[in-house]
Amino acid sequence: MGTSAEEPPSPPPPLEWDQSSSDGEEPSPSTSISFDRDRHVAYLEMMYQMLPSYYQSQEINRLTLAYFTISGLDILGALDRVDKDAVASWVLSFQAHPGDKNQLNNGQFYGFQGSRSSQFPLGCDGVLIHNLSHLASTYCALATLKTVGYNLSNVDSKSILTSMRNLQQPDGSFLPIHIGAETDLRFVYCAAAICFMLGDWNGMDREKAKEYIIKCQSYDGGFGMVPGSESHGGGTYCAVASLRLMGFMEDDILSTSGASSVIDLPLLLEWCLQRQAADGGFQGRPNKPSDTCYAFWVGAVLRILGGYKLIDGKALREFLITCQSKYGGFGKFPGELPDIYHSYYGCTAFSLLEEPGLNSLSFELGITDVAALGI
Amino acid sequence: MNLERTVRIKNGFLEITETKSEREGPKASRAYPIPAATVISLFSSHLKVVRGKPSVTGTLTEQEWKKQAMDSDDDLRPEEMVPLSQIPEWSDVVPVPKTTVPIRWRLVLEALNADLDEELDYVERIAKKNSKNYQIWHHRRWVSEKLGLMLQLRNFSLPGRFFPLMLKIIMPGPTGRLVVLLLLPWVLQALGGWEDELDYCGQLLEDDVFNNSAWNQRYFVITRSPFLGGLKTMRESEVKYTVEAILANPENESSWRYLRGLYKGDTQSLSNDLQVSSVCLKVLNGKTNHVFALSMLLDLLCHGFQANQEFRDAVNALRTSNADPPETDLAKAVCSVLEHFDPLRVNYWSFRKSKLPVSA
């Protein structure tokens, strides 16, 4: 009748964090048959606020974890949970700036470092005294900045791009960090994505990189991380996405009859499609169990080639649902506890499947289309 | 006959002493002094110098050296590591071309072999705690990239672990500063040759024929080994080897891919090789696991293979629906059968069918 005051809407019930299940018992797989968007948002938001202690050993890659979390929320249409300005400032604090222009040719790479701990110790005036800029961290930094809508023209790209050339090897591959490390396709990809996002290809020799990529195609059609190594879903993504970003592969190439390619396309296509296993999920290599993340690594390759429609989307979806955790997020295998990496790639996989309510992805950049366009 | 080897580092030399003693006979000793500078020059582009501990001078016992190695590793901070080439005191050290490295390096390795197990444990412990620390993986892989050699780990029976071990020696450098060498013993071992690599691959595959990494390694060895003559030379024997593996497990994707890989860049020879077409036929006539055989047959047909009636019969026998009129075109028939036997990829086989040249 209106005499009693209207009850305020009750807050949503808190997610039940089943304590008993956290004692090492296998949680039962999510009984949900649908994509649990709200739970995934809650999971990622929790990670955004604070990382669980078992991520300490990955502190060196903190910027990467941030990228997964923030880009994940973006895909889920939940970027409002993020303080965009705070994120941008935080990311920018990892940039290594050269003292003066001459330093750009001292062999070091002036990009972004991956974590606060890698910046320590600072000099007595608070200035960075050693530079551990890393290509992967730089990619994650720029991807995250784009995701939160930061205008990259405010970033000192000249320093990044000029010094990035120091990391490219004579064979076209890239070191990730100037002090030395392995060189492989992952860092070719990072370099290509960095140049693409900064809109400037002076950061690398594209032709050399292309030659290196071609050498990585294995006898079975997939790509290994280095020439001669076993073909692998992640390596294949890095190869194809790089070629696309660098302009060496036209869009939707499979639809173009008679299209020539610098790589063996039919063999690649069949290799990719064979990665879908009997359980509907995608494996990273032949005879290996299906893993959530390859639904993105291999799926995105198929999207780039224009061959995604050839997979069994229904079977894939069913597999991914079994990897969906009742705590939110995704695990690596069915029934496993979630982790940030697989949660991110689970979300990207559902975006590839065009799950309603999810934002579309730029397959080769690894961020949403909206973020990529910089609107 | 007893063979004893000892290695000492003394006054900037690696001194290896070999003592052979017959059971009831005289002892014979030989000493090989190898200048430390030569050791260092072999890997000069990859050595790092760390700040020496000023209190340590003169010779050290083996224990002290090991302790130094352990301690200094904990102290190692990336910013303190400088490539040798950038240190003025080492500017006259020129890398030794690997072809001129004397065989005695194997002696260094073997003599120090006793330490390798412990070393492996140490490395493994560090690696486990720091699996995301890219420097560990770098140290484990840099040589394979630089020298392009394959790792032999059979002494340690670790299938699938293709990465080298670290061995540390501490010795005084030319200016008396301590130098930590990160020697990878298998490199020294591998400098001896590739002969056993193929055997090793065979062993891995015997353990698990579904091990895709092992198939890949086999491919790497037969194509890159200077001792085996290259892909073309090895092709026939490898086809034979692979056909056997296929017949034993026709559902194994790795072996089929390897077979095709043996004809990389030469699809004409692939379609002409009777061993290849005949293994397809054998598997097609078998009870089950036809998918890869069908897919291989499709590829052969696309590359000009002229199938005889036996193939037609085998494919027809697999047709499940008698309602559909039989395809006159064998390749189209294969696609139809695949659409049924490999439903996960029904869209792909349909796509392949649509791309087939229109039959005359």
Image: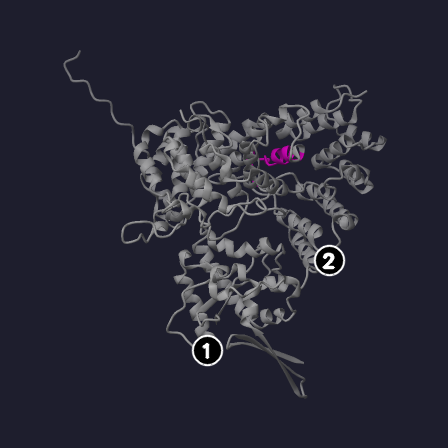
- Quarter the N terminus of chain A occupies: top left
Which is more toward the observer, A119 or B119? A119
Q: Mark 1 sits on what residue?
A: B59
Q: Mark 2 sits on what residue?
A: B227
| Mark earlier in primary sequence (2, 1) | 1
User: Residue at the spot x=67%, y=50% of the render?
Assistant: B220
Magenta segment range?
A267-284
Which is more toward the observer, B323 or B74? B74
Residue A173 is a magenta residue: no
Q: How far apart are marks 2 and 1 (CA)?
A: 42 Å
Estimate how packed mark 2 is, as few (under 14), some (14 to 19) or many (20 or more) residues with alpha carbons within 10 Å: few
* Kind of residue indicated by mark 2: Phe
* Residue B89 place in picture, x, y as percent: 47, 66
Q: Is mark 1 on a helix, strand or loop?
A: loop
Seen in the image, is B178 located left or right of residue B287? Answer: left
Let me know if residue A366 appears in the view.
no
Q: Which mark is residue A182?
A: none
* Residue A104 place in picture, x, y as percent: 43, 46
